[in-house]
Amino acid sequence: MIEATALPAPWQVSFRAGDHEGRADTVKDGAGGSTGMRPHELLAASLATCMTISARMALADLGVTDGEVRVRVHLEREESATRFRYELILDPALEPCRPAVLERVERSPVRATLSKQLIFESA
């Protein structure tokens, strides 16, 4: 569960998941700031972090423990759809592992969650 609490400064929010805390912020009509990621950036960060973890797990299964692994996610909000464009970036030495890593990234849990029909309910 995530709990978010409005802060006194315009459009700033603190959020908590168990013992972990973060801050989100946005700018609207000249008010607000940049003390944290914007809410849509948090959504993209969720996907990017999960995909990166999935990539590291795939490499670990292949016996690879070293090398740079990154995932970039661009969130595009279109009129009739939301598009997540992602890019898997591997250390050049890891390129032979790309097919296996990409297959795992494409099955990452957050991607699977976002790929299903979303239902929003008020408690």
Image (spheres, rainbow, N blue to C red):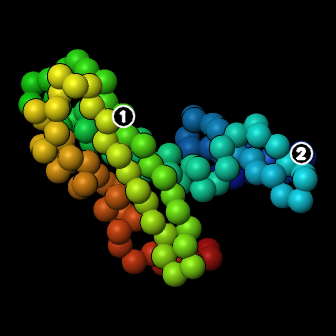
Q: Residue furthest top?
A: 66
Pointer 2 residue = 9
Q: Nearer the viewer, residue 100 or 119?
A: 100
Residue 38 shown left or right of residue 65 in the figure: right
Is residue 93 visible from the viewing direction of this image?
yes
Image position of 99 with respect to 107: above or below: above
Image coords of residue 50 (percent x, y): 37, 45
Q: Secondary structure at mark 1?
A: strand
Q: Nearer the viewer, mark 2 or mark 1?
A: 1
Q: Amino acid at mark 2?
A: Ala
Q: Height in image: 82 above or below 85?
A: below
Residue 101, horizontal then vertical, whole percent:
18, 41
* Residue found 56% across the figure and 68% down from its top: 77
Estimate the spatial distance between the alpha carbons at disc 2 and disc 1, rounded to whole Å. 33 Å
Residue 107 place in picture, x, y as percent: 23, 55
N-term mark: 2 or 1 = 2
- Residue lying at the far front of the rendered structure: 92
Q: Residue at x 28, y 52 (%)?
A: 108
Left or right placement of residue 31 versus residue 76 in this view:
right
Instruction: Answer yes or no: is residue 7 visible.
Output: no
Of residue 75 and residue 2, the one placed in the foreground of this image is: 75
Give the mark count.
Answer: 2
Residues 121 and 52: in front is 52
Badge 2: residue crowd in 10 Å (few <14, some 14–19, many ≥20): few
Q: Which quadrant is home to the C terminus?
A: bottom right
* Quarter residue 121 falls in: bottom right
Q: Which residue is mark 1?
A: 70
Is 120 left or right of 66, judged from the image as shown?
A: right
Looking at the picture, which amino acid does disc 1 mark? Arg
- Give the image location of residue 35, x and y in percent: 76, 37
State the image quarter where residue 17 is shown: top right
